[in-house]
Image: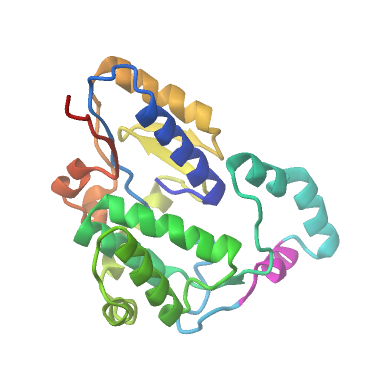
C-alpha cells in the first residue's frame, strides 16, 4: 500500500479496533502491512539534506499564496488531521528526496520483519510531519531510527544505519516498484490494496477499513497476497510473520 500520514493513522486505528475486539475471540487475527514507496517530488536532489520548506513547496505548487489559501480551505487538512489523531502538522517541515528513507524502511522490514518497519515508519511520520525534520538528513534519520528500533528490541547501531543510508542498497527494488505503480496508473496517495485486489482509494476513514477487515474475518480466510512483495524483494516468510497481531492468552 501507499499512503500519507492521515491515511496511516486511520489504518492503524482500524487495525487496533479489529485486534482489540475480534468477531471470534478464539480466532487468531493477524495483519501484514507491506509499505509501497511513493515519491511526491521525485526530481528533488538526492545529495541535498533538504530542498525547501513544505510551505514554500505548496505555495509554489498552487501558484502563489492566494491559491494555497484556497486549497487549505478546500481540503481542511487541519480538521482531517485532528479527526485522525494528529493535533499538529508542521507546515514549515523540511522537504527532501525520500529515496534513502524508503530504502531504509524496506531494509528494516527484510532484516527484522514488518513489525519493525511499521514501527519505524510511524516514528518517521512524527519526525517529519510534526517535528519538521528532513527525511534526507541521513545522520539525524540514523539516530532516530536506531533509537526507535531499540525501543522494540531490535539492535542496529546508528553507524550501521548511516552506512546503509549512504549506500545504494535496495535502490533497484524501489525503482522497479515505482515503474509498476506508474503502469497501474497510481499517481497519488493514499492508496490501499487489501488481499492483493481490493483497492481503497483516498484518505479512507478508519471505519471503512474496519468494514473491509470484518468481511475477511467473517469469511475466515484471505483471497490473495501482496502484489508488490516480489518487486520489493520481501520474502513470503516475512509477510507471513505479520506486522500487527492479536496473540491469544493462555488459559
Q: Is residue 119 magenta?
A: no
- Main SS type for the magenta part? helix
Left or right: where does residue 156 sit relative to residue 17? left
Q: Residue at x 76, y 51 (%)?
A: 71
Q: Which x, y percent locates residue 193?
A: 38, 38
Q: Nearer the viewer, residue 107 or 156?
A: 156
Magenta span of residues: 52-61
| Count of all numbered marks drawn on residues in the image | 0
**97 vs 181, nearest the viewer:** 97
The chosen color scheme is rainbow
Q: Quadrant of residue 156?
A: bottom left
Residue 188 appears in the rendering: no
| Location of residue 63 in the rendering, given as x and y in whole percent from the top left corner | 78, 63
Q: Residue at x 70, y 63 (%)?
A: 58
- The percent position of residue 189, horizontal first and vertical second, equals 52, 48
Q: Is residue 54 magenta?
A: yes
Which residue: 22% across, 29% down? 248
In this rendering, the answer to whether 9 lies above or below 200 is below
Q: Quadrant of the C terminus?
A: top left
Residue at the image position 42 percent from the left and 71 percent from the top: 144
Above or below for 220 versus 79: above
Quadrant in the picture for residue 46: bottom left
Judge left or right: residue 31 versus residue 85. left
Which residue sits furthest front?
Answer: 251
Amino acid at each position: 500500500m501507499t499512503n500519507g500520514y492521515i491515511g496511516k493513522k486511520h489504518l492503524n486505528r482500524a487495525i487496533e479496533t479489529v485486534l482489540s475486539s475480534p468477531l471470534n475471540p478464539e480466532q487468531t487475527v493477524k495483519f501484514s502491512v507491506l509499505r509501497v514507496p511513493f515519491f511526491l517530488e521525485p526530481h528533488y536532489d538526492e545529495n541535498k539534506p533538504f530542498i525547501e520548506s513544505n510551505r514554500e513547496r505548496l505555495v509554489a505548487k498552487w501558484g502563489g499564496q492566494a491559491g494555497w489559501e484556497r486549497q487549505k480551505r478546500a481540503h481542511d487538512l487541519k480538521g482531517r488531521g485532528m479527526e485522525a489523531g494528529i493535533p499538529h502538522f508542521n507546515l514549515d517541515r523540511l522537504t527532501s528526496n525520500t529515496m534513502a528513507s524508503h530504502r531504509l524502511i524496506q531494509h528494516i522490514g527484510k532484516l527484522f520483519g514488518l513489525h519493525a518497519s511499521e514501527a519505524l515508519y510511524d516514528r518517521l511520520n512524527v519526525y517529519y510531519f510534526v517535528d519538521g525534520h528532513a527525511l534526507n538528513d541521513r545522520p539525524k534519520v540514523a539516530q532516530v531510527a536506531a533509537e526507535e528500533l531499540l525501543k522494540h528490541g531490535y539492535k542496529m547501531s546508528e553507524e550501521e544505519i548511516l552506512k546503509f543510508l549512504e549506500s545504494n542498497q535496495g535502490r533497484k527494488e524501489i525503482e522497479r516498484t515505482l515503474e509498476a505503480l506508474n503502469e497501474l496508473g497510481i499517481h497519488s496517495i493514499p492508496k490501499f490494496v487489501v488481499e492483493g485486489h481490493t483497492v481503497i482509494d483516498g484518505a479512507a476513514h478508519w471505519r471503512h477499513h474496519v468494514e473491509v477487515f470484518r468481511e475477511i474475518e467473517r469469511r475466515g480466510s484471505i483471497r490473495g497476497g501482496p502484489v508488490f512483495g516480489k518487486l520489493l524483494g520481501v520474502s513470503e516468510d516475512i509477510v507471513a510473520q505479520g506486522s500487527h497481531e492479536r496473540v491469544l492468552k493462555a488459559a
